[in-house]
Amino acid sequence: MSKPTPPRPGMGAQKTRLGEILRVDQAGELAAVHIYRGQAAVMRNAPGRERIAEQLKEMEGHEQVHLTRFNDLLTERGVRPTLMSPIWRAAAFALGAGTALMGDKAAHACTEAVESVIEKHYAGQIEELKDRDPELAAELSQFRDDELAHRDLAVEEGAREAPGYPVLSAVIQAGCRAAIKISEKI
């Protein structure tokens, strides 16, 4: 589990940190929706891929629920979304479509890599917020459970059997961690 980030000292520090949390989580869910859309765009037209296309549609639906909630939280709490949203949307769709073009196992490897990073990310936030904002921490716990279910399904579907899995997974995870850091601030 990642170490929770302590609030910065000074007036407004907790509000600033909460803004970072909400901004990055909204960005992550936006990216997740677009990864699944990219994968589905490839799989829904591929013969024999109907089952995986349905799985992707269902997982996109879960991510859309999360995204809608974070959009509402940004509005309620007066937090701007990341300025990187247009770039994340395009990059996420390309990642989804690219891994789907590599095959079912690579698409699942993408899901496993992303959800593994997000699970740890949410765990750190839950720990950080559990006393300060228990309602938000509870919501994040539910979202984390959904992400774990997506990761577990991807593993069951053969994510780790993807060609070049160790490299593919490492690159995707590094990209996710970089996007998290960038989205908190920009």
Image: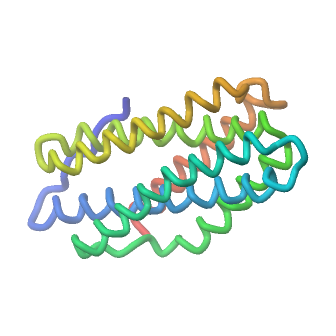
Q: Is residue 149 above or below residue 97?
A: above
Residue 37: which quarter of the image? bottom right
- Residue 93 placed where, x, y %? 69, 61
106, 80: nearer the viewer: 106
Picture quarter with the N terminus: top left
Q: Is residue 60 left or right of residue 118?
A: right
**With 147 as the anchor, is 60 left or right in this view?**
right
Q: For the view shown, which residue lies furthest in the right direction? A: 47
Q: For the C terminus, which image quadrant? A: bottom left
Q: Quadrant of residue 72?
A: bottom left
Viewer-nearest residue: 43 or 74: 43
Residue that appears at 13% across and 67% down? 12
The chosen color scheme is rainbow
Q: Residue at x 31, y 45 (%)?
A: 140
Image coordinates for residue 134, horizontal then vertical, percent: 15, 45
Please, is residue 142 above or below residue 152 in the view? below
Where on the picture, by quarter, is residue 111? top right
97 versus 54 height, above or below: below
**Residue 48 horizontal/vertical position (percent):** 87, 41
Residue 104 percent location from the top left of the image:
79, 38
Q: Residue at x 34, y 36 (%)?
A: 123
**How many numbered circles are shown?**
0
Q: Would residue 56 be found to the left or right of residue 140 on screen? A: right
